[in-house]
Image (tube, grey):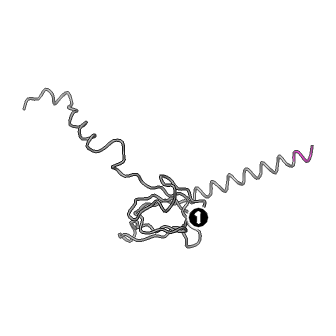
Amino acid sequence: MKIFLSVILAVTIFCFVSNFSLAQDEKDMDYSWGAVVEMSSDQIVVSEYDYDLDEEKDVVYKVNPDTELRNIEALKDLAEGDSVEISYVVKGKERIAKVITLEESYLEEEYSATEELDEEIEYVPAELEEIEY
């Protein structure tokens, strides 16, 4: 019985410590976005706006097998100029990408700007219907 309780206690402590360290990783995660400049199997370079310097700059993010890719199957599916969002952590002087998301083009959205404009044109508030021009 003592062995069983010891095992349960050890598993509980392990689970608590594991969840705590995962929460720390998520809390320490930063976020950025920009246009792809170049990429390779182990890194991606993104041109992003630096608000402190008031200019665009190229930033290197390290990529590893644990990096989650969204809206793409592999890094090679990205093209120069694609707009991406990156969630990353800083380790030393390196930025390690945790999640890379390819932003969907406005042309691919179900709801186009012309459809929205057509709906706005069709809508006339009741107060304006009574006005004669």
The relative height of residue 127 versus residue 27 in the rendered view (above or below) is above
> Could you say which is closer to the camera, residue 14 or residue 100?
100
Q: Is residue 8 above or below residue 66?
A: above
Picture coordinates of residue 3 (x, y %)? 91, 48
Residue wearing tag 1 = 64
Q: Is residue 120 above or below residue 84?
A: above
The residue drawn where x is 21% and y is 33% is 122
45 falls in the magenta region: no
Q: On the rendered structure, is 11 left or right of 62?
A: right
Q: Is 79 in front, or is 68?
A: 79
Q: Quadrant of the C terminus?
A: top left
Name the residue type under label 1: Asn
Residue 34: percent from left, percent from top: 41, 62
**For the stretch drawn in magenta, what is the main secondary structure?**
helix
Residue shown at 40%/69% (left/top)? Answer: 52
| 40 displayed left or right of 34 | right
- Quarter of the image for residue 78 reads bottom left
Residue at 16 percent of width and 30 percent of height: 128
Q: Provide residue 57's location: percent of width, then percent of height.
A: 40, 71
Residues drawn in magenta: 1-5
Q: Is residue 2 magenta?
A: yes
Q: Residue furthest left?
A: 133
Residue 47 placement (x, y as % from top left): 40, 67
Nearest the eye: 28 or 44: 44
Quarter of the image where the N terminus is located: top right
